[in-house]
Image (tube, rainbow, N blue to C red):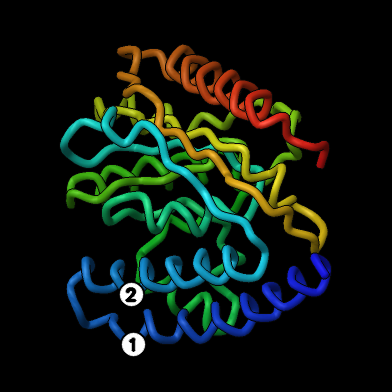
Amino acid sequence: MRQLRSLLFTVFLFVFTPACGIAVAATWVLPYRYRYATARWYAQQVLRVLHLLCGLTYRVEGLERIPPGNHIALWKHSSAWETIAMMVTLPPAVWVLKRELMWLPGVGWGLAALRPIAINRAGGHSAINQVIEQGKARLAEGLWVVIFPEGTRTAPGEVRRYGMSGAMLAVETASTIIPVAHDAGDYWPRRGLLKRPGVIRLEFGPPIEPVAGDARATNDKVQAWIESTVQRLRSAANAPPA
């Protein structure tokens, strides 16, 4: 039965997402907050159906730690779940994502209306410069900037070196970093159809101020908090192996 429910959710997701992408694209002429509100409605429906079909819900902790204003959020990336949850849990934001997503019919149209920073992940320094240049502009507009510093989804328990673009953007703009940890990879694995029922724990960490002139030290502080918190969350949940 769990396999069938997971299959039904996947079918729903693959049909509903491009349809909502078109709906978001249709709001292009409206102010950004309305476009983002449409995307947030999409994410709310997906999470509601995920709970209904797969018995998978979530709990958010640490929102009280976030100071007023718009910031840079660096998220753990172990699942597709967090790419949906970020639309529900954050104020209007833009996301750094791989440019190939912009080519998807329906989905890419909606993303274009949300003005992401779409990079070529093989671009090296040019991709980092793009994140810094466009990130500065988005922050100046009062938007959050969301980055997955690992660059791709990692399996639970796997640790890889975090990319530097988020830390460099924070140093360049003297912006606060909000680190975000969760254990979604144990419930919605990066590969495979099956979704495990349970409660994903999502935690917003204490604000991290950039170390002046030292993006590497800033990045290390972010990675240390996220990875230690993910380990704590997984241990507390006694999560099954992915």
- The quarter of the picture where residue 4 lies is bottom right
Determine which of the numbered discs, if any, sits on residue 148 in the image.
none
Q: How far across and how far down the image is residue 204, in percent?
A: 40, 33
Q: How far across and how far down the image is residue 196, in percent?
A: 73, 53
Name the residue that disc number 2 marks: 38
* Spatial CA span between label 1 and label 2: 10 Å
Q: Locate residue 91 relative to residue 193 in the image: left or right.
A: left
Determine which of the numbered discs, if any, sits on residue 26 in the image.
1
* x 66%, y 43%: residue: 78
Q: How far across and how far down the image is residue 25, in percent?
A: 37, 82
Comparing labels 1 and 2, the label whose residue is closer to the camera: 2
Mark earlier in primary sequence (1, 2): 1
Q: Is residue 142 above or below residue 168?
A: below
Q: Is residue 117 above or below residue 193?
A: above
* x 43%, y 47%: residue: 130
Secondary element at tag 1: loop
Q: Is residue 83 above or below residue 30?
A: above
Q: How far across and how far down the image is residue 44, in percent?
A: 43, 67
Name the one closer to the observer, 50 or 226.
50
Q: Amino acid at mark 1?
A: Ala
Q: Residues within 10 Å of mark 2 (few under 14, many from 20)?
A: many
Q: Amino acid at mark 2?
A: Thr
* x 55%, y 23%: residue: 229
* x 50%, y 19%: residue: 225
The quadrant of the picture occupied by the N terminus is bottom right
Q: Is residue 106 above or below residue 197?
A: below
Q: Residues within 10 Å of mark 1 (few under 14, many from 20)?
A: some
The quadrant of the picture occupied by the C terminus is top right
Secondary element at tag 2: helix
